[in-house]
Amino acid sequence: MIHYEHFVLANGLQVYVHEDASTPMAAVNILYNVGSRDEDPARTGFAHLFEHLMFGGSQHIQSYDEPLQKVGGENNAFTSPDITNYYITLPAANLETAFWLESDRMLSLSFDPQVLDVQQKVVIEEFKQRYLNQPYGDVWLKLRPLAYTQHPYQWATIGKDISHIENATMDDVKSFFFKYYLPNNAILVVAGNVTVEEVKQLCKKWFEPIAAGNPYVRQLPQEPRQTQARFLETTADTVPLNALYKVWHMPGRFDTGFYNADLLSDILGRGKSSRLYQKLLRDQPLFNNISAHISASLDPGLMIVQGTLNDGVSLEEANAAVEDVISTLAQESIAEEEITKVKNQAEATLVFSEVELLNRAMNLAYAANAGDAAMVNEEAAKIQAITPDTLRSMAQEVLRPDNCSTMFYRRSAN
Amino acid sequence: MVLDRTQAPEFQAVSEIRLPAYETFTLDNNVPVYLISVMQQPVVRLEIILDAGSWYEQTPSAAFFTIKMLTEGTKTRTSAEISEYLDSFGAFVELNSGPDRASIVVYCLTKYLGPVLSLMREVLTTPVFPEKELEDLRNITLQNLRVSFEKNAYIAGVRMREKLFGSKHPYGRMQQPAAVEAITRADVVSFYENVIRDRPFRVLLAGHATALDVELVNRELGQIPTSVPVSVRQDFIPAPDTTPLTVDKAASVQSSVRLGRVLFTREHPDFVKMLVTNEVFGGYFGSRLMKNIREDKGFTYGISSSLISFRHEGFFTLGTDVKKENTRQTLDEIAKEVRILQTEPVSESELETVKNFMAGEFVGSLNTPFEIADRYKVILLDGMPDDFLNTYIPRLRAVTPEEIMQMASQYLDINRLTEIVVGGK
């Protein structure tokens, strides 16, 4: 249970306060309602490149990091297909420093061309380090466009291609900032050893003077229901083992039925007692690694099964064995015991996710951005409401063969 | 009044740390339990610590396989039944094997601690090490290694440890496919019988737990025999090799660069001085290396250095994945930064930032019961004095610019750092 208070500033900034006097720290989380799904298909990777630029100085403050480090604070940020999230933890006594820094970069960046130039290089090295110079690093660069034909989830947050990052201009940076980095397109969560009154005063002082902008109305092409199985094969000489990837469309993070799909993926491939692990790694020696998980995106997301194959096992054989496990799940009833197990796993995950102060702040911001902060405290009840029947009907919809995209990642013969 | 956004707000330097005290209990079999009680979320972490690291093994990888096999079958339960049992409570188990120690760590809701403990007693006292599960684990481990050895950063890390300590030393001997292929069930049984069975161990319990939960621990883990003293470690002396190593990878677009040398553990009088020196050099996002190699030149996504302290030895290491064409220039810039650190005093302002950041990071790293338990390990397991954590901030504040120059000259001599490049230069 995460308790909180909520208020809105005159410029539309939504503020949530979670008081916790048991820590000497404060967490400040600002979520901007923009992710890679909002990008122009010809300029992908921009939301993430922009996140880097947010650390390159703002209108009145030359350096973002150094003044924060000076007061004992730490910060970082991440960009996803759905959001861009910035967070700080610092001694609660120095809370105002976080307000000073965050409000100035919401007001305006310095738009220094040197910063853009260097961060383009840094992001290109990040692209190489994470996606090109790693075995299987490019999987999602290939799987996304296979699974999504219309929705902008078809490109990865890092971008489709390095050239998109190289081609970004200062004009692009400015127009992106003034379109999305608005008080009325953000959620501020302040958590820890703070009071609501103190946060209200600091908000009034630092954030309220920032002018609102034109509201961003998201109109993205939605992904049509998939009605035919898709297949892609790729080869690389840097991968030591053949690998299999299968994905199915499923509901979005806060959509009805989300947890039914989430628990189905747990039954399939969470931990060593899961069906895929027991049947295809232990009972039959096909895989040396196999698991299932979900993307948990805000728009309808993906359930993913992935595994690496033992030598001497063909991808065709391994794929047929996975499909067999999938079709059993879709067609046969699930034992009560197995449902209780995955519910207990989900409950434990939920409670552990609230141990860290910063996680509580992020969970709150995430739910608020999705439309209702109260949803952060409704998860446990949603998990408990799942029945064999709701699971069954979700399995039949999601685990249809026609809803599946399959990728064979082959080790090249030489 | 007009708001002046160029003026930073007033701030306070961190001095207060809130460290809940730990309580010590002794079980019926004399096993100590250290309780860190933080009554917030209803969760607990149980950590069973065994003096059973690779220091104690006769055959490479025996410690690793023995620990991992504990949950692969007991006299009364199969591997599948053990997984099913733990997963049915939503409990999550980690089986860790390091050079000094091994541990079984369980995260669970406090309400399930009882059933989790009864299984832990079982896996510690009646494991059967079945052949089929050993073969599965061997296969999984080998295939994981094959993937890891395709990663430049992994290769660089393995080679560095071999260079620093020698490939026979427990700190230098990283897991190799040949050892994994060679291990037998007899090696595993022998390690269990000679290092784990009936030996004393220690328990850390952190989270939403009280003396009543310690009583639950006593009912299970307190009844395990501990009559045989902990095995004597064999002696190993580090055999450092400072010749540089370049592993050419034509297809790589980046090089993994590592520099390192054997230094000392946290018991050494220079430890905190060197910690501050390292922080200035490459220890945090605002470090000199980050400013130079990433924020000024854009050669890399990240570069960092750190001091690693094992139980008996410690070392310094620096690493980055850098655009291949810039590898030589990166090495030159690192050498340049070392020279500056050795010859020019750090400004008061930079030093203040570093100290405040380190103090804030330390206080911020004591936020959860699990983090607090991890911090206490240096006192409980590594024998540091009881006030080690409470005096940490004043000790780092006392470090002077002159001491940093001295540390850099004494310990960061570029000619004594071993260089490893995987990729090309």
Image (cartoon, coloured by chain):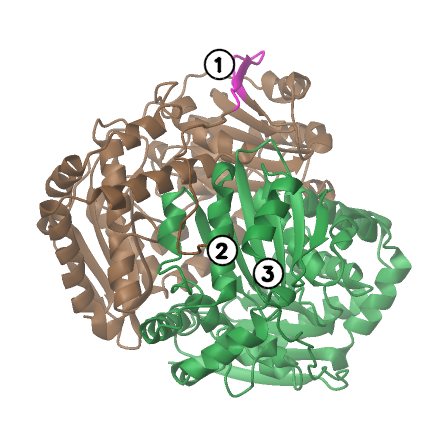
Chain colours: A green, B brown
As helix, strand or loop, the secondary structure at mark 1 comes to loop
As helix, strand or loop, the secondary structure at mark 3 comes to strand
Mark 3 belongs to which amino acid? Answer: Leu
Residue stretch in magenta: B20-34
Q: Residue at x 59, y 36 (%)?
A: B106
How would you rate the neighbour count of disc 2 (Cα within 10 Å): few for under 14, some for 14-19, many for 20 or more?
few
**Residue positioned most to the right:** A389
Q: Chain of mark 1?
A: B
Q: Which residue is mark 3?
A: A31
Q: Residue at x 30, y 64 (%)?
A: B294
Task: Pick the residue in front: B399 or A350.
Answer: B399
Report the mark closest to the observer, 3 or 1. 3
Which of the numbered marks, if any, corresponds to residue B227? 1
A289 left or right, relative to A324: left
In the rendered view of the protein, which quadrant contains the N terminus of chain A? top right
Q: Residue at x 48, y 60 (%)?
A: A104
Whether residue B266 is visible, yes or no, is no
Mark 1 belongs to which amino acid? Answer: Ser
Up-down: is B159 above or below A307? above
Q: Which residue is mark 2?
A: B2
Up-down: is B307 above or below B219? below
Q: Chain of mark 3?
A: A
Whether residue B155 is visible, yes or no, is yes
Which of the numbered marks, if any, corresponds to residue B196? none
Mark 2 belongs to which amino acid? Answer: Val
Q: Chain of mark 2?
A: B
Disc 1 to disc 2, C-alpha distance: 75 Å
